[in-house]
Amino acid sequence: MSSMFPNVQWESIWAAASETLYMTGVAVAFTFVFGLILGLLLFLTSKDNIWENKAIHTIVSAFVNIFRSIPFIILIILLIPFTKMLVGTILGANAALPALIIGAAPFYARMVEIALREIDKGVIEAAKAMGATTATIIWKVLIPESLPALVSGITVTAIALVGYTAMAGVVGAGGLGNLAYLEGFQRSHNDVTFVATVLILIIVFAIQLIGDFVTSKIDKR
């Protein structure tokens, strides 16, 4: 193994992989929560829905569109003052989390909105006719009915977040992206870059397999 990858320090590789998994895992959890909230707001405040409110819908939609459109590497730079205020540093895995979450949550919010729009309106109207409260409609109708699409959406978002962590590594966030850039690219150690890339691909494939498995289990259609 050492003859095939002479420049690879495996302890550094595993440490970087654990940082990538940590950043992805934490960011996915927060993205799911914030993206779900934003997506519900987009859906519920849209025309002919429960909380129809053009002003709120416009504000939330503008927020989602703006942060969804900013290239991630630029977003990291723009958020440096906010990150330093929140985390106390702009280096390391924790420093990457604000940008990861703010970059991914709007992306997932649109997926949530699309999933909710695919629900048969008759189901929602039936729940209203039975006197269900808004909270009941959200928890007993909207989320259960759209759950397979929500899981598929968070799977796609999680894979995007793995790519985001690699980009965040270029500006000192740690992880496999940071290792590939500093140890691989800058020092012309192609074997390090190759190993880091393979591990990122393995993580992506694992996320996709888990997401597909969970979706198949909960999709009763």
Image: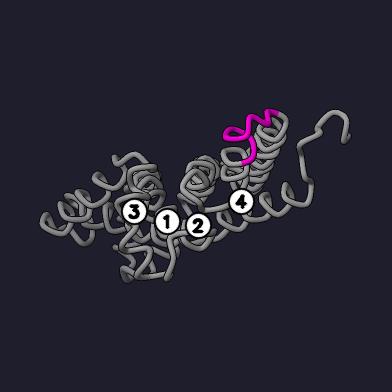
The image shows residue 44 at horizontal and vertical percentages of 26, 57
CB within 8 Å, label 2 to label 1: yes
The image shows residue 103 at horizontal and vertical percentages of 38, 49
**CA separation in Å, label 4 and label 2:** 11 Å
Q: Which residue was labeled with disc 2?
A: 27
Residue sitting nearer the eye, 147 or 103? 103
Rendered-image quadrant of the N terminus: top right
Stretch of the chain drawn in magenta: 183-190
Whether residue 149 can be seen here: no
Q: Which residue was labeled with disc 1?
A: 101
Camera-near label (4 vs 1) is: 4
- Counting residues from the start of the chain, the first of labels 3 and 4 encountered is 4
The image shows residue 84 at horizontal and vertical percentages of 37, 66
Q: Which residue was labeled with disc 3?
A: 39
Q: How crowded is mark 3: few (under 14 residues within 10 Å), some or many (20 or more)?
A: many
Query: Is 199 above or below relative to 28?
Result: above
- Counting residues from the start of the chain, the first of labels 2 and 1 encountered is 2
Q: Where on the picture, by quarter, is residue 52?
A: bottom left
Q: What element carries label 1?
A: helix
Q: Which residue was labeled with disc 4?
A: 20
Camera-near label (3 vs 1) is: 1
- Counting residues from the start of the chain, the first of labels 2 and 3 encountered is 2
**CA separation in Å, label 3 and label 1:** 15 Å
- Counting residues from the start of the chain, the first of labels 3 and 1 encountered is 3
**CA separation in Å, label 2 and label 3:** 17 Å
Camera-near label (2 vs 3) is: 2
Q: Residues within 10 Å of mark 4 (few under 14, many from 20)?
A: many
Q: What's the residue type where badge 2 is placed?
A: Ala
Q: Is mark 2 on a helix, strand or loop?
A: helix
Whether residue 170 can be seen here: yes
